[in-house]
Structure formats: C-alpha cells, structure tokens
Amino acid sequence: MANTAQSKKRARQATARTDVNKARRSRIRTFLRNLEEAIASGDKAVAQEALRAAQPELMRGVTKGVMHKNTASRKMSRLAARVKAIA
C-alpha cells in the first residue's frame, strides 16, 4: 500500500486513469461490434456508414493512448477490406 503522500496521489490518479481508459476501450469495442453486425447483415451501405463511424473512434483511441497506432491501422485496413468485399 502507498505510504507517502505522493504515492497515495499516484495511486488515486492510476485508478482514475484506469476508469477513463476502460470507458474509452469499451466505446471503441461498441463501434467495432456495430460494424461487425453491419458486415454480417450483408448490407454494404450500412456497413460503410458503420465503418465511417468507427474509424475516428479507433484513431481517437490511438491519440488517447488506449491502443497502438499500428494496431488501429491494421484493424481499420482489415475491416475496410471486409466492407469492400460485400457484394
């Protein structure tokens, strides 16, 4: 357990930061889930709209430090390819 005032404050900050990051990650996953459902439905217009909504959320996760830039780029690339492949 934290003993000094500084370490107590750091523990509080870490807890708060964890909650914020958890909320951000959850929000990103929700957008990705909506996109997955749109792809599964086979409706290209809906899937493209979901892709447009998910992209800024993924990149915002990068700027906020929730995920790595290459990870987000790889996910976007794969999802865009799947949306494009819809007949």
Image: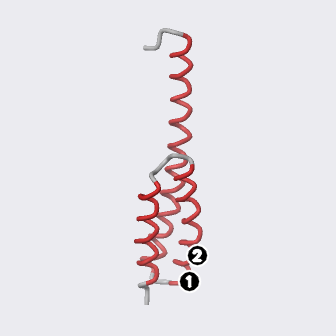
* Apparent side of residue 84 relative to residue 45 in the rendered image (left or right): left
Quick one: label 1, few (<14), some, or many (20+) residues within 10 Å? few
In this view, 85 is above or below 61: below
Residue occupying the far top of the picture: 3
The answer to whether the residue labelled 2 contacts the one labelled 1, judged by CB atoms less than 8 Å apart, is yes
Task: Residue 25: give its label.
Answer: none
Q: Position of residue 16 (x, y in %)?
A: 56, 32
Q: Position of residue 24 (x, y in %)?
A: 54, 48
Residue type at numbered disc 1 = Ala
Task: Residue 49: give its label.
Answer: 2
Q: How many marks?
A: 2
Q: Position of residue 48 (x, y in %)?
A: 54, 78
* Apparent side of residue 39 relative to residue 20 in the rendered image (left or right): left
Give the residue at x 50% y 43%. Answer: 22
Give the residue at x 43% y 14%. Answer: 1
Colour pattern of the rendering: secondary structure
Find numbered disc 1 in the image and state the secondary structure of the residue it sits on: helix
For the residues marked 2 and 1, what is the alpha-carbon distance in whole angstroms? 6 Å
Give the residue at x 56% y 51%. Answer: 63
Q: Residue under label 1, please give it.
A: 45
Out of 41 and 67, give the one closest to the viewer: 67
In this view, 55 is above or below 5: below
Residue occupying the far bottom of the picture: 87
Give the residue at x 43% y 90%. Answer: 87
Find numbered disc 2 in the image and state the secondary structure of the residue it sits on: helix
In this view, 76 is above or below 20: below
